[in-house]
Image (tube, rainbow, N blue to C red):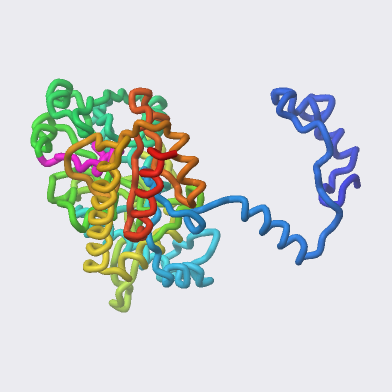
Amino acid sequence: MNHKYIPHTEQDIKKMLDTIGVSSIDDLFREVPSEIKLKRDYNFTNSLSELEVTKRLQDLASKNKSSDDLTCFIGAGAYDHYIPSVIHHITNRSEFYTAYTPYQPEVAQGTLQYIFEYQTMISNLTGMDVSNASMYDGATSTAEAMMMAVAKRRKNKVLVSKTIHPNTLSVLKTYAKYQGVEIKMIETKDGITSRDDLEDKIDNTIAGVIVQNPNFYGRIEDVESYVDLIHEHKSLLIMNVNPISLPVLKTPGEIGADIVCGDAQPLGIPLSFGGPYIGFLATTNSLMRKMPGRICGETTDIEGKRAFVLTLQAREQHIRREKANSNICSNQSLNALAVTVYLSTLGNQGTREVALQNIKKSHYAFKKISALNGFEAVYDGPFFNEFVIKSDYDYNTIKNTLYEKGIISGLHLGDYDNSLKNHILFCVTEKRTAKEIDHLVDVLGGLAHA
């Protein structure tokens, strides 16, 4: 035995190498460029006590700065919202906190019930008939929505507004590339989807039109003004939405959307350096059987008692592979539970209050920042909790100055579009106080005197 934690003997290794036809361990990694290979021993110290290991790991972890350490003004798909403490207490209960989601109805009524409640709440929030039992994240749920439209309409062309998040678009293109779907982009006008360009491009060959609301630039789209146009061409309207905005905006169901998707991270899921998050997907009764993943239903047992079961599972593990729209497996169940607890804790009044605070505080910050010398508003129109500011100063100077003052700057849109250099997408959630916003404004205003 060569190593305490590696049980293979030299004979074991030689036998495995002979079997696969290579002469050495190095041959296994010959595709890895030599300049990125580690050419020394690992820098491990001698054995440490548990106390020393804990301290060492804490020191390493403390090098990461999170929204708990800094005041966060960045959003763009991952948002720093308040998370009620009850969520952590419930999701950490041993009956829920498991590496695997039990589905067998005779042993998993608790799991099935909260999935059912989650679906019901998402349906109510979006104004749609039915929701499935969650998806990986907002980007993949949007891609799954696209494939639903393609399957339902039996057409392989989709229109996507350029106001969608670039990362979501990247996932859409990946799905489309390997599914033979053609994506055409709709131009923007003043930071929202161009109706004129939509009119030019839509025809009866389009399976679906995908619009994000509020969009990547924070602006609220006037989707209602062109929903009839989409339906006149037998196309489906797919709306990617921020769920925290829905209590104060007209719901996708009221607008006439056919499929609603997005990321439920704002509903009680921590930022966690990027995940895991949870996508959601809701639709109409007529499209229910095209939904990926699972749908949990309510029924009664042989004694007439209320019970829950998985009802529809239109995926390749349950139906013939060639009939499946999707092979998605996860239902992100623990995060679905967190969303369920969040929505049930806040209720209708609480979620509406959160949404209103996002609007009021972001608009307060918008007015203050856009009034500063060297900063100006880019768009003039309704927005929810994000807005774009153009600056005369270099973005890196702004970012570094804010960081030195304990503030995370907004997102630099120039990283996604060369024409938007020094354009910053700021986000203000209900967590930000007037004092924190004023501090941000003071630091930005101080750049003129630096």
Q: Is residue 229 left or right of residue 316?
A: left
* Quarter-of-image position of residue 374: top left
Q: Residue at x 36, y 26 (%)?
A: 417
Residue 218 lies in magenta, yes or no? yes
Count of marks overlaid on the render: 0
Residue 229 lies in magenta, yes or no? no
- Residue 290 appears in the picture as rendered: no
Q: Residue at x 70, y 25 (%)?
A: 32
| Quadrant occupied by the C terminus | top left
* Quarter-of-image position of residue 187: top left
Query: In the displayed structure, would residue 273 be above or below residue 86?
Result: above
The foreground one among 423 and 93 is: 423
The foreground one among 108 and 317 is: 108
Q: Residue at x 84, y 25 (%)?
A: 23
Q: Position of residue 371 (x, y in %)?
A: 25, 43
**Residue reaching furthest front?**
449
Query: In the displayed structure, would residue 313 be above or below residue 35?
Result: below
The secondary structure that most of the magenta stretch takes on is loop
Q: Residue at x 32, y 71 (%)?
A: 345
Q: Is residue 398 left or right of residue 258?
A: right
Q: Which residues are magenta?
A: 210-224
The foreground one among 422 and 392 is: 392
Query: In the displayed structure, would residue 346 be above or below residue 379?
Result: below
Q: Position of residue 367 (x, y in %)?
A: 24, 47
The foreground one among 75 and 300 is: 75
**Residue reaching furthest top?**
200
Q: Position of residue 11 (x, y in %)?
A: 90, 38
